[in-house]
Amino acid sequence: MKFRPDIEGLRALAIAPVVLFHAYPALLPGGFVGVDIFFVISGYLITSLLMQRLATRQYSIASFYAARIRRIFPALFFMLALTLPAAYCLMPPRGMQEFAHTMGASSLFVSNMELYRSTGYFDGAAELKPLLHTWSLAVEEQYYILFPPLLALLYRYRRAAITPLLAAIGVLSLLGSVWLLRHNPSLAFYAISSRAFELMIGSLLAVLPATAAPRGLRQGLALAGLAAVLAACLLYRPTTPFPGAAALLPCLGTALIIWSGGGPDATLVGRLLAAPPLRWLGALSFSLYLWHWPVLVFTRHALLGSPNAWQTAAAVLLAVLLAQASLRWVETPVRRASAHDRRLLLAGLACMLLSLLAAWALSSQAGRLQQEPGEAARLLAGAQDFSPERARCHRGEKDVTSYPQQCRFGAAAGPRHLAVWADSHGAELALALGERAATRATTVTQITSSSCPPAWGLEIASRPRCKAHNDAMLAALAADPTLDRVVLVARYGFYLGMDAPAFEAGLRHSVQTLLAAGKRVVLVDPYPGYDYPVPAALAARWRRGSDPAGFGQGLDDYRAHNAAALAMLERLAPTGASRLDTAGLLCGSGRCAVLAEGRPLYFDDNHLSMQGARLLAAALLP
């Protein structure tokens, strides 16, 4: 297969946005589409190679997999080998165990489904998962496993069906991705079935007959492709429903660049991509992709929070150095070594088995650490201090529950009835209020749904059922004659960052509707939030000899961080709603508390634990 320097440079156009997005998200909010560029390139190159070998009768499934081992395994398992001790030294036991599970799944190239399975409130923030990025490698490897035998069978028995079948797979994958985005966005992101159309775009490029297009046409299409890729990087946001139809813009843009560069003379875009700096970065792209994310994540673990701009730059530089070392001293020697396919296959199997064994050992050690007594263990136990009724009463993105089916706590039929209507920030508060309500002749109804704030009419792409849920809940709350008070709480800043006008308008409508129905409304001010799980940070500070309570943010920092949310609540309160001043309760000393009676007030980085929720409940039901 003829080497194309422009495609090597195109890899730079894929890796640079990914690294920038992970390091400085505000600079390139759509940089995550770099992964999709990689998928199209992989589909094109692998299919081109397979078609060439099939045509010359050199195709061998063993040789193909041996070549994949030679290309992927050295860099991958070198990264896993070095990140394992970092995980042991820097991560809390629960995070360490999660790392071990993902490491094992990465060794078997199923980490995309392991990460889908473990996605949730209690599995750690994405920014703290060192192997989160291996999901895309798993998708590619699954493609490598499934696609070559299919193509070989078609080439031998139904050669004319190759193009229509690949197109059909791509269309079905795209339609399935669009459908999943509405019903299960997390699965749509991770599953190969939702990403196959991106790989098929590259594969179709490789099997379509070559045409001698005029140079002017190729120039225009190459520029259009580059514009499409850059537009996706600049205009998309993490909230953009993805992959689905939105992935077509960067993928088709990449396809145009590849197709237009296949002519006898290079286009302007092709010459740009073939420039030495871009080719250098493109050659480094696989190693850099593997290294940049773990280095950024372990920086957060070392600092117990988000790094500043200079610390982030240092982390990126370290990732580049590690990637260069991996390419020069690990990957290149293996690629150049003469080794029989059988030996490579056995070596690959040995790497997988050793990695699985190391993951098992780390998981076992993490389990033992979680059982050890002591102050650090007591602080870490705060991660389990969430509502025991979450599984039964808190609604996830796929749950739909009517108003009468919502959980009720406290007095079975007390003369007073209040409801907590919230996103996940209200789950612990509802139960804490329920604990107090039993002795106060009060009933508490919990209406909480993940990432779905109590704002009427608000459309959230990643939570397609949220609008219908809120519309139904608002109507039911307003019509309930037994209800006299509604407590509203949300992670306000999160939604203000999506669509501030729509969120405020929806929240205002909810407040006004409830007030018009004769209900009292209490708006709970935002909780102080952190960049690192509080129980783990407190335990780490204790182990390092620092005062755990010093982890709490200053009152001025709280006000600055939540300025937009506090201003919005200030505008809503004059409509007749009252407010609960969480800063007055938690930050009275000038520093927001993270401990009470020696127990963490949070179970992660932003959700109050039951210990913390009880402080607020005491103010709401004195």
Image (cartoon, grey):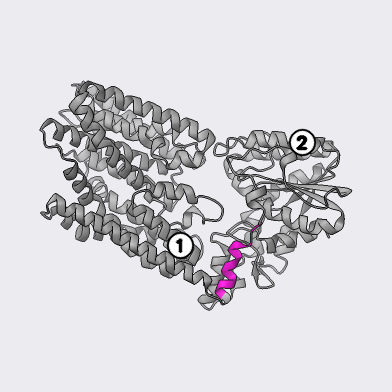
Give yes or no for contact between labels 1 and 2 (Cβ–Cβ under 8 Å): no
Instruction: Residue under label 2, please give it.
Output: 476
Query: Is residue 495 at least partly visible in the picture?
Result: yes
Secondary structure mostly seen in the magenta stretch: helix
Question: Helix, strand or loop at disc 2?
Answer: helix
On screen, residue 384 versus residue 364, left or right, reads right
Q: Quadrant of residue 547?
A: bottom right
Magenta region, residue range: 376-387
> What amino acid is found at the position of numbered circle 1 in the picture?
Gln
Asked if residue 339 lies in the magenta stretch, the reply is no
On screen, residue 56 versus residue 177, left or right, reads left
> Crowdedness of circle 1 by 10 Å Cα count: few (<14), some, many (20+)?
many
Residue ID at (57%, 66%): 535
Query: Is residue 25 at least partly visible in the picture?
Result: no
On screen, residue 63 above or below 555:
above
Alpha carbon separation for disc pair 1 and 2: 43 Å
Asked if residue 381 lies in the magenta stretch, the reply is yes
Task: Give how far across and how far down residue 355 sits, in percent.
Answer: 32, 60
Question: Helix, strand or loop at disc 1?
Answer: helix
Task: Give how far across and how far down residue 244 sits, in percent.
Answer: 45, 33
Instruction: Residue under label 1, please give it.
Output: 97
The residue lying toward the viewer, choosing from 424 and 214, is 424
Q: Nearer the viewer, mark 1 or mark 2?
A: 1
The residue lying toward the viewer, choosing from 221 and 181, is 181
Q: Quadrant of the C terminus?
A: bottom right
> What amino acid is found at the position of numbered circle 2 in the picture?
Ala
